Amino acid sequence: MKIAILMTVFNRSKVTQKCLKNLYISKNKCDCILDIYLTDDSSTDSTVKDIKDNFPEVNIIYGDGNLYWNRGMHKAWLFASKKKYDAFLWLNDDVVLKENSLDILINSSKKFENNSIIVGATCDK
């Protein structure tokens, strides 16, 4: 399954990197291809540099500081929708995925012939 991951970030480099690290761990537990589209809404910290240095395969889309989450996600979707994907995953950068999260989401989607909207449960540690 080919999945576009959509994210919007602003000034949370360490949080964003932790999310991406766990996303890749989860990817290793499933049979999937991921393309990540990350809208940075004009971060003033080291977010963009850190993502480029540590996750060079991430597609960074630049905002003007006025997108906030909603318009940032829309902008990421506009870029991702130029390619063919089986699914789009909206992922907040403060989410730490469990190792088998993507596998669970993919199997849930397959139960409905990949024609569904699936919302993952979250918990607070």
Image: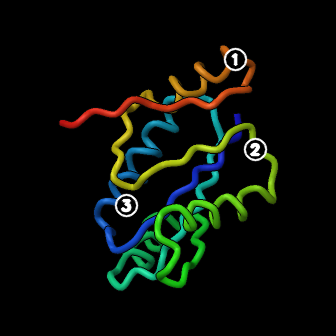
Q: Residue at x 53, y 84 (%)?
A: 64
Q: Alpha-carbon neighbours of circle 1 within 10 Å: few (<14), some, or many (≥20)?
A: few
Residues under numbered marks 1 and 3 in contact, where contact means CB atoms less than 8 Å apart: no
Query: Which of disc 2 and disc 3 is earlier in sequence?
Result: 3
Left or right of 118: which side holds 23? Answer: left
Give above or below for 108 relative to 48. Answer: above
Query: Which of disc 1 and disc 2 is earlier in sequence?
Result: 2
* Residue 16 numbered tag: 3
Instruction: Check disc 1 and report the residue beneath it.
Output: 112
How far across and down, in percent of the image, does residue 121 sit?
39, 29
Q: CA distance from mark 1 to mark 3?
A: 31 Å
Q: Residue at x 71, y 58 (%)?
A: 80
Give above or below for 19 relative to 98. Answer: below
What is the quadrant of residue 48 in the picture?
A: bottom left
* Residue 85 numbered tag: 2
Q: CA distance from mark 2 to mark 1?
A: 17 Å
Pick the residue in front: 40 or 31.
Answer: 40
Query: Which of disc 3 and disc 1 is earlier in sequence?
Result: 3
Q: Mark 2: which amino acid?
A: Tyr
Pick the residue in front: 37 or 64.
Answer: 64
Q: Mark 1: which amino acid?
A: Phe
Query: From the image, which quarter does the N terminus lie in?
Result: top right
How far across and down, in percent of the image, does residue 79 sit?
71, 64
* Residue 12 numbered tag: none
Q: Alpha-carbon neighbours of circle 3 within 10 Å: few (<14), some, or many (≥20)?
A: many
Query: From the image, which quarter does the C terminus lie in?
Result: top left
Residues under numbered marks 3 and 2 in contact, where contact means CB atoms less than 8 Å apart: no
Q: Mark 3: which amino acid?
A: Thr
SS for dot 1:
loop
Number of numbered markers: 3
